[in-house]
Image (cartoon, rainbow, N blue to C red):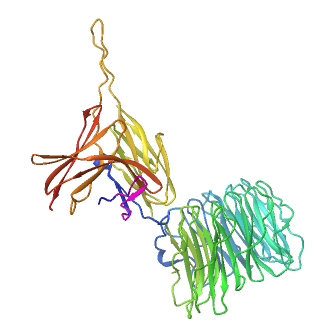
Amino acid sequence: MIGVAVTHAGRVVGARLRRVILVSALGACALVALVAPGSAIASALGPWLPSPPADLSAAGPNASHPHVAVAADGATTITWLSNNIVQAATRAAGARTFSPAVALSAPGQDASDPQVAVAADGATTITWVRNNVVQAATRAAGAPFFFIAVDLSAAGGTITAPQVAVAADGATTITWSRNNIVQAATRTAGATTFSTAVDISAPAASLPAPQVAAAADGARTITWVRNNIVQAATSPAGATTFSIAVDISAPGGSLAAPQVAVAADGATTITWLRDNIVQAATRVAGATTFGREVAVSAADQIATDPHVAVAADGATSITWVRDTYNSFNIQVATRAAGATTFNAPENLSGIGLENAYAPQVAVAADGATAITWQRTNNANFIVQTATRAAGAATFSATVDLSAVGQDASSPQVAVAADGATTITWVRNNIVQAATATPPPSRLTVAKAGSGSGTVTSSPAGIDCGTVCSAEFTNLKRVTLTAAAANGSTFTDWIGVCSGSAATCTVTMNEARWAIATFTATAPTPTPSPTPSPTPSPTPTPKAAKPAVTWPSSSKGKRALTALITPIPGVTYTLTARSGRTTKNGTCKNVTIKQGKNRLARRACTVKLRKGKWLVSITPKRQGIAGVVNSKTYTIKN
């Protein structure tokens, strides 16, 4: 049986086969497309590198509080405290190593709680507390250094850990609590300075650190707990002031640890703890109010430390620590894009006596999700991770990132637009980091039809012509352009591309293929120089050599079936010759299934007896035979 799954009259023929092999009419551009039924849409992450993980901070000084952020082009910045001075290191886009650490806060007073955020263009802002004043330093897009830190909050009072968020347009908001009042300062898109700090909440007896998230359009949402009620306020794009705070949770119970995340369309989800149960509420895109709170974790188990991340399409993942009364384990629940409820929690760190803590979650543009945490091996704390590829339903097995022998703690995670995932942590008072990147995907093109032409790609890689296959990084958008040669026209695409437009854009998150069809055009007839010229009839071009998928072997077969990629206006006959014996085959239209596509084919079958046979497919256009495609088989029984 040949390696093609064919559908005909509602039946699936060859359902056991897992590969679809298509061969173009031009041998130089053979096309092989592999289909793995039930596989994830995107590739899994590659190995975590470097191995062992890279040291970012110097040995000796006490390093702590790492935090990581990634720009749209993959440039990654990690910040931390070293002997109470804020430091940072950056890995440029495409680089494999981080720069040497640079100090951002001034000596003389202790700094604490650094946080980093990166705009789409790479502009990076780091904020921290020094001498009870919130400060921030910014590195402009493309700049090699950070500007001198500026004060954002007034001097004096009690300051909680600041949080920072950057919108796609570069608008940056930093929020904190001062004397139990939530405050914020904003630098609008294109501005060089922050606004004066504004009060967001009313005073409260006790108010923990607020959290902030920014939407793609520049709107920012800040959330906090006040008097055991989760509250939130929002600032529209371009503004520096916030709306009046609104209650998100119902009154009653003990509430803590709010976290907020925003989808690309502005849908906003806030999660928190109420009486040791993870809850969440969502404001859908375009709405002005949040929906009712829902329970995410089980009611019969204690939960702590929730953290939330949202994919571009709105799929939302919340992770937390679950207390089973015997151990602490990491769980996650996901709400699919467009859904209104979260699925049942999934255990990530395993059920056992090895306690796990401090989960963090990050999501790539295509929905690939990474969660990291620290877990004891009964001797030391080890940083671990589990990842879920885009389109997958479950997470991978747990992977150990930090080495044994010393405690590792405070893991943080960020995911780049192409899915590259960076996790940082502290081990033996040294900040370390490791990165895993999805492997590249191969794009293969071929040409078919009676004409000729070329197919090129942008970015460069394919020039078919001669180079008909290339690998591209995950989620890279590749534009294919078909250009017909003189005497030919471009007809259409088959495969991942479709339609008759000469250009086609493909997003690379798996191996993909496309066929460009070119059709020869008839030459313009030369009029006869007679007094009464008679127009020459338009010649009928010979049909091109057909694109045929031949059976790979005749072993154990008497009936051979060839699959033809048909061209409109061309008929096909199959003949087999052995000595003086000739047998004619029968042909019928069939459909093959390629992923979500159904492709029309012509299947021709001939029954043979023992001997050596030359099997040929002859195309005809208007009764004129074209170029024959043949193959020899030997029938042994």
Q: Position of residue 493 (x, y in %)?
A: 43, 44
**Residue 616 visible from this viewpoint:** yes
In-front residue for pair 394/479: 394
Residue placed at 32% from the left, 59% from the top? 3
Q: Does residue 502 sit above or below 237 in this rendering? A: above
Residue under the image location 46 percent in, 73 percent down: 47
- Rendering coords of residue 262 (x, y %): 70, 63
Farthest-out residue, left: 579
Task: Quadrant for the N terminus, please.
Answer: bottom left
Q: Which residues are magenta?
A: 4-17
Which quadrant holds the C terminus?
A: bottom left
Would residue 519 be counted in the magenta stretch? no
Task: Decide if residue 393 is on the left or right side of residue 631.
Answer: right
Residue 9 shown in magenta: yes
Location of residue 185 (image quadrant): bottom right
Residue 552 pos. (x, y %): 25, 58
The one of 434 and 494 positioned closer to us in this rendering:
494
Give me the residue at 57% from left, 61% from top: 366
Q: Residue lying furthest front in this view?
A: 9
Check the image and report above or below for 136 versus 458.
below
Decide if residue 573 is on the left or right side of residue 365. Answer: left
Across and down, in percent, residue 84 comes to 69, 80
Tell which of 183 and 56 is nearer to you.
183
Q: Is residue 50 left or right of residue 317?
A: left
Residue 298, quarter of picture: bottom right
Task: Tell which residue pokes out farthest to the top in this image.
Answer: 531
In this view of the protein, can residue 149 be seen by the observer?
no
Front-lying residue, 588 or 418:
588
Q: Is residue 614 above or below residue 198?
A: above
